[in-house]
Structures are given as structure tokens and as C-alpha cells.
Image (tube, rainbow, N blue to C red):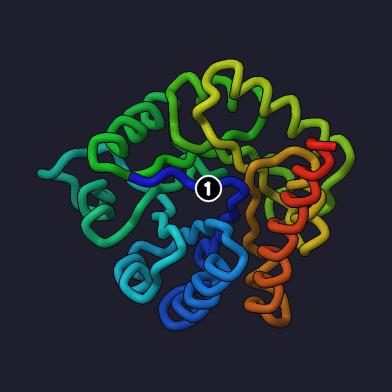
Amino acid sequence: MKKLRVPFFEIGPKAYLYGEEALKLAKAADELAEEYEVDIIFTAQYTDIRRIADATKNIRVFAQHMDSLKPGRGVGAVLPEALKEAGAEGVLLNHAEKPLTITEISRCIERAKEVGLISMVCAANVKEARMIAALEPDIILAESPELIGKGARSKEDAIAIEIINEAVHSISKNIQILHGAGIQNENDVYEIIHAGAQATGSTSGIILAESPELMLKKMIKAVATAWKQRKKEEEA
């Protein structure tokens, strides 16, 4: 299980894309990951994990959810071992559209560790981020449900980046933090990385763009540019 390089980026197709369209975007992401040396997470539909994993070499294919059960009974549940076997490197948990109890989050993180999947767990606020950090996931995806799919990030959101980073890293500096929600274009990407995020991501900003592949390229370029500028300012 290879840890992601920072900065990194997550594409969340949700149920907007599947099949050939998802594969097309994943291949574009694969090329961009190599060109800009930015790790890209692609959270695919379960049914697309195998074909995307087989067709790419640079992106990190994640599942959009899983359950904590072990092999045996469990019709309709998502088995961690099956995701790993299909080619997934990680799993997204506790998204606002697929919320979990804190007990199930804990169980899923442990199961992810057992089978060798990277766990990326969503947190809606500082309190939840701190609570989830205590469970030691690999990545916390900090995003306000009010901003998902709506955009309109503000200066207050930039302040929240620092607050959440401090809260999580006071518990464990090994946890990587992705700040998302409301990322509509490359300018949003630049600002959030420059403001202190290790990673960010987008769904509607990419999927609903006139050219998803072009928007994705602009966003990945912005990740690399903002990180380089940030490091330059920190060293000055």
C-alpha cells in the first residue's frame, strides 16, 4: 500500500459517469498524473474498477464505499477483499451522500488496513475531523456538505483549512488531509492548495464542464503550480 505523494487530487465521478465515459476520463487523468507528477485518485463505480485499473498505470483507483463485513453471508454488501481483488488501491468512506456511523467507520478503517486498502474518510467539520482522526485513517477528506456541488468558497474556508489541519495533525501527523467541496475551476484549485491544503478534488466542476478533460488538465496544472509557488514562499 503506497502512500500518496503531496499534493494530490481526487476526481469523484459519483454516479455521473460510468462505463466508457468514465474510462475515457480516467485515461486522461492517467496521462496528466504522469505529466505533472501529481497523484490522482479516481473514485470509480464498483463495476468500473477492474477495467480502469487494468487500463491505467499512474492514477490511484478508489471505490466509492465499502462495508466492514468479512467473506461469508452479506448479499448486496461491498466486500473489502473483492475491491482489492478488482484492482482498487483505496476506498472512500462516510461521504455526505453515503454517511456511516462512527462505529462502522472504525470497522471499515480496520478492514481496509487488513486487506491493504487506503482509507479516505469524509469529515464535515472540525469536530468530526478530530473524531475521525482518532481512528487513524490514511486520509481525511474535509468538506462541508453545504458546499458540495455548489461552489462559492470564501475566505472563511481558507481559514478553516488551517484549523482542520492543526486539529488533525495534533492527533496524528501521518494522516493526509484533502480539502474539497465547492471546487469549480482551476482558480479554486490554486487558491485551496496555496492556502495550505495537501490535496483537493472536484466532481461537478469537472463532470459538468464543456470539456471535462480540458477542465481536469487545468485543475491538475493548478495543483502543481500552486504547490510550487507555496513552497517557494515558505523557503523565502
Quadrant of res 158? top right
The image shows a total of numbered marks equal to: 1
Tell me where residue 177 appears, x and y as whole percent. 59, 37
Residue 44 shows in this picture: yes
Q: Nearer the viewer, residue 36 or 181?
A: 36
Tell me where residue 202 appears, x and y as whole percent. 65, 58
The residue beneath circle 1 is 5
**Quarter of the N terminus within the rendering:** top left
Tell me where residue 154 appears, x and y as whole percent. 87, 43
Q: Is residue 12 above or below residue 69?
A: below
Quadrant of res 225? bottom right
- For the point 64% across and 42% down, the residue is 198
Q: Amino acid at mark 1?
A: Arg
Q: Secondary structure at mark 1?
A: loop
- For the point 74% across and 25% down, the residue is 163
Q: Nearer the viewer, residue 88 or 234?
A: 234
- For the point 63% across and 54% down, the residue is 201
**Quarter of the C terminus within the rendering:** top right
Residue 150 shows in this picture: no
Q: Residue at the right extreme?
A: 155
Label 1 CA crowd tier, 10 Å (few <14, some 14–19, many 20+): some
